[in-house]
Image (tube, rainbow, N blue to C red):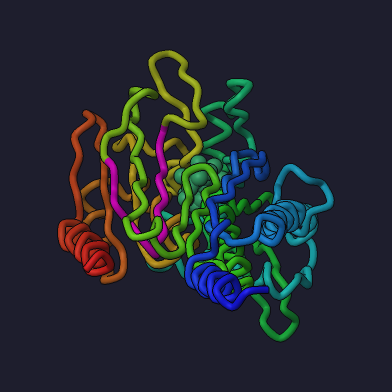
Amino acid sequence: MQPKRIGFLLLLLAGSLLHPLNAAWISMDEAIMGTKISVQIWHSDDTVGQAAINAVMDEFHRLDRKLSPYIESSELSLLNNTAAYKPVPISDEFYQLLKISMDYSELTNGAFDITFASIGHQYDYREGIKPSEKRIDQSLSLIQYKHIQLIPEKQAVFFRRPGVRIDLGGIAKGYAVDRGIKLLQQRGVKHALISAGGDSRLLGDHMGRPWHIGIQAPRDRTSMAAVLPLADSAVSTSGDYERYFERDGMRYHHIISPKTGRSADTLQSVTIIGPNATRTDALSTSIFILGASAGMELINRLNDVEAVIIDRQGYMSTSDGLADLATQQSSKASNKHE
Ligand code: ADP
Ligand code: MG
C-alpha cells in the first residue's frame, strides 16, 4: 500500500476513535410494569448498544416479577399473603426497598405510605370499581406504615395487623429506572434516557445540549404545561389523569391519601426533579398527597430536589431553586460549546 494511502487510513482511524463514525442514537420501547418503558442511548456499536438496552429491559422484567402485586408468585404477593401470620424472610433487595419506603413515610409525615394498598387494592381503575364508603372507613386504620415490622436480624417482615397490605407502585418504577441507568453506566454508556411512564432519568446530556423533558398539561392530552431543559438528573410526575374514573362528579384516581383512604384531591400534577428516580418517584407521589403548601415547604427544605406543582385550578407554582437549576443547565451546555 502507498504511504500516502496508509497515512489517510491512519487519519481515518484516529478520527473514528475520537468520534466513532457510526455512533448513533438507538432506542427501544416495551410494555412492562403496566407502563411504557423507553430506553434511548448513544452508542458507537449498534449490536453492543442493543445488548445494553436489552439488559435494561431484562432488569425491568426481573423487578416486575419480584415486586408486582398482580403476579401471584412475586415476593411482594408472598408477603401480602403471609406476613400477618408469621415473620417472612425476604431478599436483601426487597428488604432495602421496604426500608427506603418507610424512610419516605417518616420524611413526608406519613403521606408516603406503602400500606395505602390495604384499601388501594380494592380499586380497579380500568373497570371503574371502588370500595364502598363504609368499607373505606372500616379499613382506614390499616393504612399505617408502623404496622410493618422490619426484623433486621432475620431480614424478615411481619405485619402487626391482619388485613394490612403493601404495594410499591409509588417507588418501584423509579427504582427500576435507577437500576437501568446503573447497568448502562457499567457498560460505558455516557448519554441515555430511561423512562417508565411518569418516571425518567437522564444520563449525561443530549450530545452538547440538554434533554427536553415535557410536563404534560393535566387536562389537555395534546399539550405541554412546560418543558424542562435537563441533564444528569431524574424527573417524575404524579398526576390524577393517568389512572382514574369519574362517577357522580367525583374523580377517583390512584394516589391515595393515608389520612382519608380516598384519592388526594387538591392538585392535578406534581413534577419533581432530583438526583435519582427512586427519590423523585417517591417524592412526586408524596407531594401530590401533601398538597401545594406543605409539599412546597418540604421541597424547599430539601436541597437536592425541585418541584413544579399544578393545582386544582390548573395554576402552576415552582420551588425556590428551579430558576437556578435552569440557569445551571444552560451554562453547562454553553460551556461545552466554547
Ligand atoms: P405512576 O404509577 O403513574 O408513576 P405515581 O408515581 O404518581 O404513579 O404513584 C402512584 C402510585 O403510587 C399508585 O398507583 C399506587 O401504586 C402508589 N400509591 C398511591 N398512594 C400512595 C401512598 N399514599 N403512598 C405510597 N404509594 C402510593
Ligand atoms: Mg411516584
Q: What residue range appears in magenta?
A: 227-240
Expressed as whole percent of the image width and height from the top left, the position of residue 249 reads 38, 15
Magenta segment: does it hold 286? no
Q: Quadrant of residue 321?
A: bottom left
Q: Residue at x 19, y 65 (%)?
A: 331
Residue 109 in sight in this render: no
* Total count of labels: 0
Q: Residue at x 23, y 55 (%)?
A: 296
Expressed as whole percent of the image width and height from the top left, the position of residue 282 reads 45, 57
Q: Point out the image quarter for the N terminus.
A: bottom right
Q: Point out the image quarter for the C terminus.
A: bottom left
Residue found at the far top of this picture: 248
Who is closer to the viewer here, 77 or 170?
170
Q: Is residue 112 above or below residue 151?
A: above
Who is closer to the viewer here, 204 or 178?
204
Who is closer to the viewer here, 328 or 278?
328
Residue found at the far bottom of this picture: 153
Who is closer to the viewer here, 261 or 113?
113
Q: Is residue 235 above or below residue 278?
A: above
